[in-house]
Image: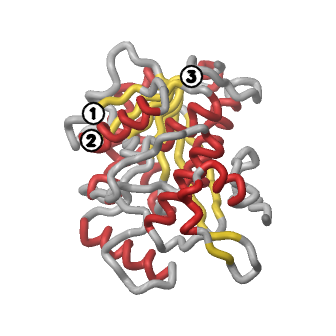
Amino acid sequence: MATKPMLHPRNQHRDGYDFVRLLEATPELEPFVTRNPRGGMTIDFANAEAVRMLNRALLSAQYDVKFWEFPDTYLCPPIPGRVDYIHSLADLLAEDNGGDIPGGDDIKVLDIGTGASLVYPLIGQHEYGWDFTGVDIDQVSIKAARQINERNGLNISLRHQKNPKNIFRGVIHPRDIFHLTMCNPPFHSSLEQAGRGTERKWRNLGKEPSTKLNFGGQNAELWCPGGEIGFIGRMVEQSVEFAEQCLWFTTLVSKKENLRTIDRLLSKAGVAETKTVEMAQGQKTSRFVAWTYYSKKQRAL
């Protein structure tokens, strides 16, 4: 298996997919495994069922997640990229901790839009033992995430965001303290735009355009009024109200052209420091923006 140097050094998927190990953990994956022209094992990444089964096998073999079921039409996240976000957040905390990554349930993390798959808390709790609180606006997602949590014997808190205009309001309680917030925001501004994005992804996979995306996704997972920049703008605005209750606010930013506007919004909010951290998986580059209202001296863990 060829090493993927673009992934984070601690990412378990740097060496590609160990299909022998995955098949041992999840024999149900076998019908979806084929041979590529070089003789190696792979799957058809345009096949939604194959992608879901691969992700289930990855979580089982490498993150001790033995139950991972949720409605078929909900977002099925690709695991390696999600893992990179978690490890990069660990590095962010280490910078304020003498280079050492703080672990254990003393570290509190708020996952905005945790989704039906509960993927970030599952990975973060396994890799670092952090204490996660997952938030979602969708009741079905909360129900599915709660089942995953309970069936795996975990202790992940889940909260329902009742107001679609709110990000942190209503889900951060007066006595809450978080070291991190994280988010993978919806990046389309309308259902039509999300549909066009879906068609592009099918073409990139070498398939005929379809309305069905191989990674799935409900409306709230894919689009919101104002798109990515509108969502992040509300996040920045509301973060001011909870400045003393969180060490670092962070969010993924899909569109690089939005960074300039986000920087302007953060400057207006009066943050103490911002960081943009780039992550790359194969041909794709992603990034997250982090901001804090605490000085470096105040942030020392």
Quadrant of residue 72 within the rendered picture: bottom left
- How many neighbours does mark 3 have within 10 angstroms: few (below 14), some (14-19), or many (20 or more)? some
The local secondary structure at tag 3 comes to: loop
For badge 2, the amino acid type reads Ile
**Mark 3 or mark 1, whichever is nearer to me:** 1
Q: Which residue is drawn at 48% across and 55% down?
A: 77
Quadrant of residue 4 within the rendered picture: bottom right
Could you give the CA–CA distance between mark 3 and mark 1, rounded to whole angstroms? 21 Å
For badge 3, the amino acid type reads Ile
Identity of the residue furthest to the right in this view: 2
Residue holding disc 1: 160
Return the disc, 2 or 3, that comes first in the chain's sequence: 3
Q: Which residue is drawn at 64% across and 30% down?
A: 128
Depth order, front residue of 288/156: 156
The local secondary structure at tag 1 comes to: strand
Labelled pair 3, 1 in contact (Cβ < 8 Å): no
Residue holding disc 3: 107
How far from the left and from the top, in percent, is residue 242? 38, 25
Return the disc, 1 or 2, that comes first in the chain's sequence: 2
Q: Above or below — where is 215 with respect to 163?
A: below
- How many neighbours does mark 2 have within 10 angstroms: few (below 14), some (14-19), or many (20 or more)? many
Residue holding disc 2: 137
Labelled pair 1, 2 in contact (Cβ < 8 Å): yes
Residue 266: in sight, yes or no?
no
The local secondary structure at tag 2 comes to: loop
